[in-house]
Image: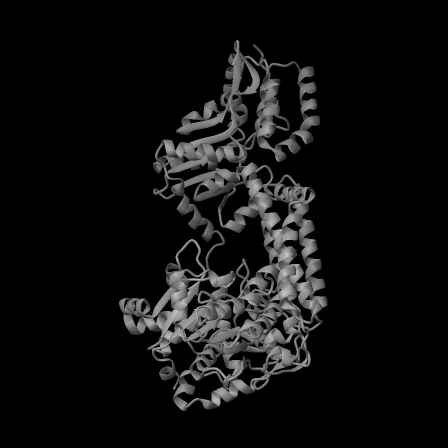
Amino acid sequence: MIPESLAGRRLAITGSTGFLGTALVERLLHSVPDCELVLLVRPGRRSPAERVRREVLKNDAFDRLRARHGADGFAELCDRRVHAVAGDVGVDGLGLDDEGRAALATCDVVIHSAATVAFDSPFDLAVEVNLLGPTRIAQTVRELGASPHLIAVSTCYVAGTRRGEAPERPLHESPFFVDIDWRTEVETTRRRRMDAEIESRDADRLATFEREARSQLGAAGTALLAARTEQHRERWVKSHMVDAGRARAASVGFPDAYAFTKALGERALLETRGDLPVTIVRPSIIESALEEPFPGWIRGFRMAEPILLNYGRGVLTEFPGVPEGVVDVIPIDHVTAAIVAVAAQGPDPEPSVVQVASGAVNPFLTWRLIELARRWYSENPLYDDRDQPISPPPFTYPGRGRVQAQLTRAKRGLETAERLLHRLPIRGRQAEFSATLEERREQVERALEYVELYGAYTECEATYSVDRLLERWDRLDETDQAAFSFDPRVIDWEKYLLEVHFPSVMRVGRVKTAPTGRSSSSRHDRLRRAVLSPDRHLAAFDLENTLIASNVVASYGWLATRRLDPADRTRLITRTLLQAPGLLLLDRRDRSDFLRSFYRRYDHAPVDQLDEDSLEMFSDLILAKSFPAAIRRVRRHRELGHRTVLITGALDFVTEPLRPLFDDILCASLQVEKGNYTGHLRSVPPTGETRAELLHSYAEEHGLDLAQSIAYADSTSDLPMLEAVSYPVAVNPETKLATIARRRGWLVEDFHKSPGSPRKLLPIGARRTA
């Protein structure tokens, strides 16, 4: 019997923080009560033991063990039977310390399930983990003088894009085998990565990355722009390596770098294993549990879920597959049961292969999957943002190329619409339409990505033999067969899909499966309540387009024309209007440079005169263009005991009348000589990252916690200040900030001027008559 065969034995497991690894740990703890587990976990910010506790043992897969033993009993069981050591299959020697090497040396079985399973992994990462990982395991245990049974988890898709039977035997024994020097593949891939890193630092490419960052963030400040530029560079390198992997894999008959590197990993392991006993287990597409640890258990999304969810959302209306093709999926508990059985039965005299698949003995056809999906969504529709059910469209099977072309056209149209909107001077609810467009574009991009990634799999016509799997099944007695079911012939696909898998996918995907029955502003109200909680400490406000519908140009225009005769007024306004495009361009490029340049217009302006005129401007311009809801919001924060501060690039004589509204005002000011302003700023104007620095200093000075603070602003140039607090609020946001706020789940407020506010075409000061 399986539990007796593994009793008292130590099993090492790599990849325990992943989907399959977590299921393996649970299965062994639950069904083989007398074995011990050594988990090799890649170290990070947390220790291996902490990672196992947080990322593995807290998973709901272990709920039945917690229910059986109680919380304290489960903790004691894990302390006694689970040992975490630092290990990384992506580096030579596995990165083991002395404790880890000693623990690995005592293991009777090593189950190597660690892998980079994403079909769009960078080629070099897939090579280091999938290709070299098994070899590193074998080499390390041999150096330790140990000879455990190594069970290497691979994939059925190492067979490539062939049609027909794919047998359970090593790849080099196949008549379709392409003999590739895996060592050369490792060397050239590492060189390709270095070449990509060098090319990404080319001056022209760096300039491109910087332009892309600026187009997304505007004048957000040097620090944020630099960080975003580096993100674009790193993304370019990753994309380059992803494309390299796809191209290389396709050139030798594999759907992607994942399957290709797994195939080379098998070849490298068998070539370098020495006398180490090895069994290779190849699952097909692993999906949610049929029964163990409970029906529908799943961790993350596998291959089919994104396609099915996009179908339910109405994004994907055509299926990139062959209707008569076989969708070879296998529940996760069948895979774990097969691996445990292989561990208990021991290795064959020579390295052997066991495939855990369903297509050869219980085929599930593509058209049947789509029929069941349509039936499910007809009875259980998803709902859109307006609480309307989404009707599942009838599917056609036009082939992968046509589906990709359809989605590509939709993506380009949405991108064009976004670019046009970003160039328009729109704010608030109009700008939020841009965020809606971006969400739709991202949905289309994801659908396109899924089609590109999984298209080759949906069109695969290979049949994976399971003769050796069934031979091992037949060796089990009735008790083991009941406890460790891995016979794919028993799966009722209709029942599995409709009663187990689909409900689980809806739960894990957190999709909207029913109308909310609440107003569309309910989430907005929850965010507002959090912002206006008495627990908050500080509320920081921008001025322009946040509290008032005005800006420094309007203030200057009003003050400059206050004492001019009609002819001079006309000339000044005309000159300013002609300069407007250049001023706007400078403002978008760098807010601080814009303010320095524009404020030089105040050179030789009398201090006393501007102080006097600013008081009149306050009632004639500032109050007239203020947002009453914003003023009430400031007062509400003060009522709640929050400290309020205005942080703005406007000049002090403009903001002075607002001082009674705030506890403090941090603003720009000009140097003075002989009673006149010089046009030169006293210090760096509070814009971009300077605002965030001022906010940090202000909070520290007054003993306030920015984690309990709020910031209100309207533009991406204010991102550093918004990101400095835990409760950012986008007020009448421009298109770029509207998009960012929607994506990050920030509160968005739409403040307006009073309906009866006077409307002036130009900011001209009331002419002084005395």
Where does the N terminus fall, quadrant-wise?
Answer: bottom left
Name the residue located 62 percent from the left edge and 41 percent from the top edge.
Answer: 214
Whether residue 117 can be seen here? no
Name the residue located 46 percent from the left edge and 70 percent from the top edge.
Answer: 141
| Foreground residue among 622 and 609 | 609
Residue 230 against residue 19 in the figure, above or below: above
Total numbered labels: 0
| Foreground residue among 541 and 12 | 12
| Foreground residue among 104 and 438 | 104
Whether residue 642 can be seen here? yes
Occupied quadrant, residue 168: bottom right
95 with respect to 259 (left or right): left
47 with respect to 271 (left or right): left
Occupied quadrant, residue 358: bottom right
Across and down, in percent, residue 130 comes to: 56, 67
Across and down, in percent, residue 603 comes to: 59, 16
Where does the C terminus fall, quadrant-wise?
Answer: top right
Across and down, in percent, residue 343 comes to: 44, 79
Residue 506 against residue 352 in the figure, above or below: above
Residue 476 against residue 618 in the figure, above or below: below
